[in-house]
Amino acid sequence: MEEKWWQRSVVYQIYPRSFQDSNGDGIGDLPGITDRLEYIRELGTDTIWLSPVYKSPNDDNGYDISDYQDIMEEFGTMSDFDALLEKAHSLGLKIVMDLVVNHSSDEHRWFVESRLSRDNPYRDYYFWRDGKDGGAPNNWGSCFGGSAWEFDERTGMYYLHLFSKKQPDLNWDNPAVRDEIFRMMDWWLQKGIDGFRMDVISLISKPEGLPDGEPRPNGYASFELCANGPHEHAYLREMNRRVLSRYDLLTVGECAGVTLEEAKSYANLDGRELSMVFQFEHMGADFHPVLGRYALQHKNLPKLKEILSRWQRELDGVAWNSLYWDNHDQPRVVSRYGSEKEEYRELSAKMLATCLHMMQGTPYVYQGEELGMTNYPWTSIDQINDIESLGNYRDFHAKGYMTEEEGVTMMRQRSRDNARTPMQWDAGPAAGFTTGTPWLPVNPNHTFLNAAEQLGRSDSVFRYYQKLIALRKELDVIVFGRYALLEPEHPDLFVYTRTLGDESLLVMCNFSEESQAYSIPSEFREAETLIANYPDPTPADTLRPWEAVVLRRR
């Protein structure tokens, strides 16, 4: 196949609210991002994924959009966006926008009209249903806790919201809805943006008849029963045909409930749908069977390896992987799979980066990940802002699954707010993020864990990410090499090879703070060290705590 520019790219995700505040109101904004573009360029990433900056009442931090062609006042103006886009392009950086079209805000003009009457022309832009047996139309649950249906007294019907009640689901079965969305997408592409990250795009085609699902312990069926619906691929191919295929874009779908077989359609190299997908299977490797992410679970490295390896093998030559540990919806990976201990924090951050960046696919670096940022030490539920964390905590607390003290512990480990604390630029007040009061508290460890300190040090996590990113740009074996897992059942070692023609890599990663015995395969005994996170890499039969070594044989 013809090589695509996004196969060799590394994407940097910006969560605008927490990246850089330029006016002292405590909220990150577009001019702040523009001021920091040189930092992203220095890192070596070449594409920016910008989380939503559209006009929004902010019920779900911008993922509830009231106007797709305007900018949230807190973030700036459309002129500020145009200036950001122009400067990014002048620096050789591409901009990928977040596309949130499974749902809109309830303050979007379409929904405002829709709820006026049962015969309003916009009524069928959303899912309105009569109740059943004195309650909701079915037993579907919201991702944010509670029912996925909200009763509206004005017309005596319920509307569907798989997320917040202020995020009513759009009805993609209505051709008028698709026409509106495709026109809006083309408007942004005409501006010159370079692609879309598509929020929960796998949920846009709902099951025929909206039937009940198997209830979970909280009494509701999982919202994921709407994933990969009957017309999903038809709608995406229509989108591709009418809009995407007319431009040279990176498109990535956030696909809740996606299977490998489905991914081969979503991200097929034939280019009929999307460039790649975000799958979540590896994110659930340490989830609880009842409480999901909101429970402390021991690391299960064999399960994590099996999932990631299966996706590496099965998509090779068929579709394209996206690679990530962190994003705005996940706790910090150093706190999750690495170590916060001072002697191991940077070693583990570099090890985790090595393990991911040596795989096949497009890597995503979430703001602060390149510094090894960690979770926040929350002490009270009252500190939590995230609607998902709070909704699920209230559900579990009410049903007796979780005390308030246990809830706080869960937030320290699992809340999405751990990824949303402000970017740590320097050791000063508010970490250089703002001159005002930040909307979320700054992690106390910013006094020693910050960008200014790491930019001045050659052995920092930032400089290590630079090296990994440069290697991907340089070596075909990292981009296209065949993957093979070694030691699948080892509880602490993640070891794999990448092979392309006569060139091979051996990637060895120790996911523990104990030294681990490992006998290097004979064919790599004389291989060169490509990259390592210890300053004195010496291929031996032991991997030190949190050690990562990549050997190259030619």
Image: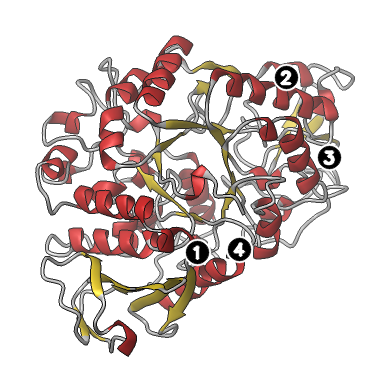
Residue type at tag 2: Trp
Q: Which residue is mark 3?
A: 131
Judged by depth in the image, the label closer to the viewer, 2 or 1, is 1
Q: Which residue is mark 4?
A: 317
| Residue 313 appears anywhere in the view | yes
Q: Which residue is mark 1?
A: 282
Judged by depth in the image, the label closer to the viewer, 4 or 1, is 4
Which tag, 4 or 3, sits closer to the chain's start? Answer: 3
- Distance between the alpha carbons at the discs numbered 4 and 1: 21 Å
Residue density around tag 4, few if under 14, some if 14–19, many if 20 or more, within 10 Å: few
Q: Secondary structure at mark 1?
A: helix
Residue type at tag 1: His
Asked whether, in this view, residue 430 is left or right of residue 204, the answer is left
The residue located at (23%, 29%) in the rendering is: 433
Judged by depth in the image, the label closer to the viewer, 2 or 3, is 2
Judged by depth in the image, the label closer to the viewer, 4 or 2, is 4
- Distance between the alpha carbons at the discs numbered 2 and 3: 22 Å
Residue type at tag 3: Gly
Q: Is residue 446 above or below residue 411?
A: above
Which tag, 2 or 1, sits closer to the chain's start? Answer: 2
Q: Where is residue 332 shown, x and y percent of the image?
A: 34, 52
The residue located at (44%, 83%) in the rendering is: 488
Residue type at tag 4: Gly
Q: Which residue is mark 2?
A: 110
